[in-house]
Image (cartoon, rainbow, N blue to C red):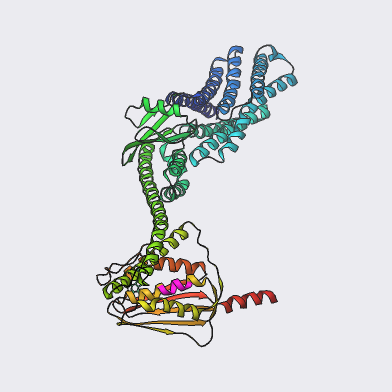
Amino acid sequence: MATFVQVVLDLTALAFAGLGVGAVVEWYRQRGRAAAMLALSLSLLGVVAILGRVETLTGSSPWIGAITLIAFLGCGYFVLLFRDAFVPLRAREQWGARALFVVACVIGIGLVTVLSRAPVPVLTAATLLVVLAWGVFIGEPIVRFWIASSGLPAVQRIRMRTLSFGFGGLVLVVLVAAIGGTAIQSPAWTIVIQLVALAMVPVIYVSFSPPTLLRNIWRMGETSKLREAIQDLLIFSPDPGVLTEQAVGWAIRLLGAQASFIVDPGGKIMARRNVSESAIADILKRRTGQAMGSSPDGATVLIAPLPLSEGNGYIGVIAGPFTPLFGSDEISQLQGYATSVAAGIERTRVTERMATIEKHKSQFLNLASHELRGPMTVIRGYGSMMQSGMFGQLNERGRKAAEVMMAKITEMNGMIEQMIEAARLEDDSLMIKPQDADLRDIVRAAADRVRPLLDESHHLKVQVPNRAVPVKVDVERVQTIVSNLIDNAVKYSPSGGEVTVSVTGRGGLGRVVVKDGGVGIAPADMSTLFTRFGRVANPKTDHLPGTGLGLYLGRQLARLHGGDITVDSVAGEGSTFTLHLPALERTRAVREAQAVT
Ligand code: ADP
């Protein structure tokens, strides 16, 4: 049993010494203040463990005892400084910690020298004070890390918690050993305590140098969420600014880094987080063409090219105190991410360009329609004066020409009015003025508007019910919608035929159905009908004038009234367009019902 206890003690001492060496190697790779503090703390812990074993071989000496105690307290003190690298201590706390360290060291040295023969209560009190100081140095960071870890990405969170857990285990071991005193000096107890301490070694080790496999396992739960979020970011971001701004945030999360930046091919910073402009300039200057570089303060930086259409930009991530060591998997991860971000930036640029074109189109529509209106009014005025003989009597050919001219002026006027309405709709200045009316009258008036334009091959039939169909609508606009539907029915029946317009008022809805036997519309073309400037290509009707605005406006106006326009058509056989409007009966019925309740 005794030899087994010795083996376990040796093993634990060796493991802690190894842990110290591991932490120093890690500091050598990463540098930085935090890594240095952790390396100091863990190597001092290794020193304590080794000196403990040396003492059993050489017998106890005050010198070894004093060094062990200082190393033990130093181990705790540097854990506190390690914490200070993440969450800085206030000046008062720093002074307090220093004072406590010095007092505890003095008492500790006293314990193994002048106080070694003091009465037991004094010894116990002094020992407890030293252990308590150590417990404060380590206990405070344990709690702090645990709390601070909650908002962090998975890898950093688990690393911080693992570290807290590992140090927590050590505190427990030391407290049990200190408080238990002679009561737990049996071989069995020693083995249990040593094994618990030994178990903390790998726990602490993985917290500062987690292997790739562990990092991937820790990241697993977050990866799919991360992927979805990144996908959303790339697909839905409205402009390159928002996209790059969020992309640097996700790069930090993805790689568990401290900071990130994106620069365009011209070296202009597109977005940055937790890193200054001058530091980015410095990083780019130091670039060697390798994926791995370093920042001015020595932190590791990963840089991947951002393949944009005008050349390569760069995305960079900078390691922080708790960043896992960057390796080949992080490099390929960042490269894949950079490609997606570049595709996203290109997409937002196209969207932006489209939005600009769309804006210019609206501006042009607005400007052109308003500018055309004035001259058109003058031309129309002179045309009708000419027609009425104010400038002298026209001969037969002149009268015919004036008639055609007036018809064309009316047609153009209609187009200009449509453009003005569309422009109003786009800048939200289109107002409807609803008033009580009979849908039958509106439809009759609309048909009368179109009738003069009919030729002999077309026959227009209007069917209205005997009872009024009361509606509350903008009469002028609904008349325009219906006359446009009738006009289309005639226009897109180039070989002539009958156009039927029927009005119904049933089930709380007023309906106007315009049916023709014309060219019809193929299912594939249905989606363009109601779009702005949407016209269907058809060799039979391509020569006909039109703006492609009529149905777009008609539907928007109908919707402003709480209604809609629907279509039913078979290519080559004809179309049926239906205007739906909420009838007044419905509105009244609802209002009355509300008044009763
Ligand atoms: P426009 O008639 O000025 O081109 P509209 O917005 O009124 O614009 O109509 C859009 C397109 O829908 C037309 O170009 C035409 O191709 C198609 N269309 C409209 N009404 C009919 C119809 N009754 N029959 C067949 N096609 C139609």
Q: Position of residue 247 (x, y in %)?
A: 44, 42
Q: Which quarter of the picture shows residue 78?
A: top right
Is any atom of residue 214 visible in this view?
no
- Whether 160 is among the magenta residues is no
Name the residue rendered at 37%, 30% in the picture: 292
Q: Position of residue 532 (x, y in %)?
A: 39, 62
Q: Is residue 218 above or below residue 61?
A: below
Q: Is residue 205 above or below residue 483?
A: above
**Furthest residue to the bottom?**
466
Give the quadrant of the C terminus. bottom right
The overriding secondary structure of the stretch rendered in magenta is: helix
In the foreground, 366 or 310: 366
The magenta region covers: 478-483
In the foreground, 176 or 460: 460
Q: Which quarter of the picture shows residue 318?
A: top left
Is any atom of residue 119 visible in this view?
yes
In the rendered view, does 500 fall on the left or right side of 89? Answer: left
Give the quadrant of the N terminus. top right
Q: Position of residue 472 (x, y in %)?
A: 56, 74
In the foreground, 88 or 418: 418
Q: Is residue 324 above or below residue 365?
A: above
Within the displayed image, which quadrant is ligand 1 positioned in? bottom left
Q: Position of residue 459 (x, y in %)?
A: 34, 83
